[in-house]
Amino acid sequence: MDTSVAILLVVILVVAVGIVAWIMLQKRRTENLRERFGPEYDHTLSELGDQREAEAELEARKKRVERLNIRPLESAEREYFITAWRSTQAQFVDEPPVAIAAADRLVAEVMRARGYSIGDFEQRAADISVDHPNVLANYRAAHMIALANERGETNTEDLRQAMVHYRALFEDLLETREREVAQ
């Protein structure tokens, strides 16, 4: 075998190894994003229609949230928010539409206290997706019901469902489940 053929075979081998390595890295990246974002990965993929674009969006969200100063709530803050939530839930009995608006505001307050930016809904949802992807669908559903509520297009069952969705996100933001399990 002459030298030029040997060099060509080495180059082909190096290129093939490089391609396999690149494919493996892409697959691992996808797996990591699926694991981190859970159902939000599929939602973003469905919304954008292209895997590369969806993954780039999720990576951008992750980088954006890393620049924020997200922090756990202090004990006094947590107690304040728990008390406010109980009051909001009690208000639901007599004034469900008012309670839903209050729940939406309270979730935004908790987000702000934790260090999330409070832009428009889509930005809040994108930011929440990084650390709380499993309850993001709840937040979206609750928000849609809250908007319908503002237009007078909801019934009590819709509002009850929104309250359940807000509570799931609220508890996740307060990190109460982890604390209860640890105690």
Image (cartoon, grey):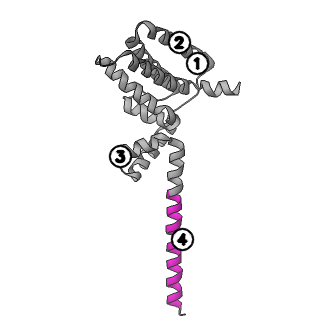
Marks 4/2: CA–CA distance: 59 Å
Identity, as a three-letter code, of the amino acid under mark 2: Arg
Upstream in sequence: badge 1 or badge 4: 4
Callout 2 secondary element: helix
User: In this figure, which residue is indicated by the disc labeled 3?
Assistant: 48
User: In this figure, which residue is indicated by the disc labeled 2?
Assistant: 86
Query: Camera-side residue: 88 or 152?
Result: 152
Marks 3/4: CA–CA distance: 31 Å
For the N terminus, the quadrant is: bottom right
Residue 117 visible, this orientation:
no
Query: Camera-side residue: 181 or 17?
Result: 181
Residue 173 visible, this orientation:
yes
Identity, as a three-letter code, of the amino acid under mark 3: Leu
Magenta stretch holds residue 40: no
User: In this figure, which residue is indicated by the disc labeled 4?
Assistant: 17
- The numbered dot on residue 78 is 1
